[in-house]
Image: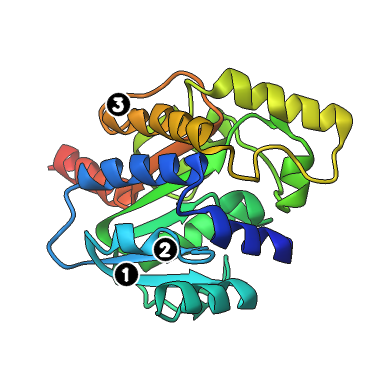
């Protein structure tokens, strides 16, 4: 991302409706998972550290970020160091050591998305899980994506293909930000036509508007852990690394 994007993230991620809503949904989904006590959780692409306190409710957190500036800001903001690293081949995490890996709007920044998912699978313990969010719908591509250095936006089928080809079993695949989808879609399409210097949606709206949008988006935390939404601005997936092991076990039982 542009350096200014990291500064904007640090200034807004504690209050902006989008960050707060995404964090509330992720927290609810993680709470629904069967994580062991003292789980080892890794956040890849941790940015300026806005999700770390939420994740620490569920275990010991290792945070990895490629940007020197983002790591510096995170150190000042939350008082802890983030590890330097990037996907797909430079994540400082031991193989088969993680109970949960989190990628919140990260995979769309990586050219080698399939190779990255394959690499992540090697870091998980047997039965370990991944929670991932990405922007949805390539037709929503706009200056917002260009400014954030996105490589792509995902369709539901494309994300499913990438995950399954890397050897995972999918537990949950849902759109998010459904209620605000018409507003967000219109803003992205306007950005694409007008090509403004500063894309819409980056600044925090006035407090009453921000509070209303945060409440609407965060309300999906009561739905997404147990159901799938049919449309939305983003996609959320939860998947585990035991697809191959399960197939082998089934084949063994059939052979017996």
Residue in the foreground of this view, choosing between 82 and 249: 82
Residue in the foreground of this view, choosing between 83 and 219: 219
Quarter of the image holding residue 192? top right
Q: Is 240 above or below relative to 216? A: below
Mark 1: give few (<14), some (14-19) or many (20+) Cα within 10 Å: many
Q: How far from the left and from the top, in percent, is residue 28?
A: 27, 41
Upstream in the sequence, badge 1 or badge 2?
2
Q: Residue at x 87, y 30 (%)?
A: 194
Quarter of the image holding residue 200? top right
Q: Residue at x 51, y 38 (%)?
A: 207
Do tag 1 and tag 2 residues touch (Cβ < 8 Å)? yes
Q: How far from the left and from the top, in percent, is residue 7?
A: 64, 64
Mark 2: give few (<14), some (14-19) or many (20+) Cα within 10 Å: many
Q: How many marks?
A: 3
Q: Is 98 above or below relative to 245? A: below
Q: Is 81 above or below relative to 149? A: below
Q: Secondary structure at mark 1?
A: strand
Q: Residue at x 44, y 47 (%)?
A: 132
The quadrant of the picture occupied by the C terminus is top left
Upstream in the sequence, badge 3 or badge 1?
1
Residue behind mark 2: 43
Tell me, for residue 196, which label it has, or none: none
Tell me, for residue 61, which label it has, or none: 1
Q: How far from the left and from the top, in percent, is residue 40?
A: 26, 68
């Amino acid at each position: 991302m542009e350096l200014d994007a990291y500064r904007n993230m640090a200034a807004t991620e504690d209050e902006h409706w989008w960050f707060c809503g995404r964090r509330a949904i992720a927290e609810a989904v993680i709470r629904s998972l069967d994580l062991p006590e003292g789980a080892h959780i890794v956040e890849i692409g941790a940015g300026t550290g806005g999700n770390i306190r939420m994740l620490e409710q569920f275990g010991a957190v290792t945070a990895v970020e490629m940007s020197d500036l983002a790591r510096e800001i995170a150190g000042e903001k939350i008082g802890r160091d983030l590890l330097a690293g990037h996907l797909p081949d430079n994540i400082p995490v031991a193989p088969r050591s993680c109970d949960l890996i989190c990628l919140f709007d990260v995979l769309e920044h990586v050219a080698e998305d399939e190779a990255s998912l394959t690499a992540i699978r090697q870091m998980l313990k047997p039965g370990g899980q991944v929670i991932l969010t990405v922007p949805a719908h390539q037709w929503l591509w706009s200056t917002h994506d260009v400014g954030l250095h996105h490589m792509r936006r995902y369709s539901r089928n494309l994300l499913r293909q990438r995950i399954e080809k890397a050897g995972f079993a999918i537990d949950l695949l849902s759109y998010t930000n459904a209620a605000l989808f018409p507003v967000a879609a219109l803003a992205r399409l306007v950005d694409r036509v007008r090509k403004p210097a500063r894309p819409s949606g980056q600044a925090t709206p006035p407090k009453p508007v921000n509070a209303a949008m945060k409440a609407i988006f965060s309300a999906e935390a009561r739905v997404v852990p147990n159901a799938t939404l049919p449309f939305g601005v983003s996609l959320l997936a939860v998947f585990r690394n035991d697809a191959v092991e399960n197939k082998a076990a089934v084949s063994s039982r059939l052979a017996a």
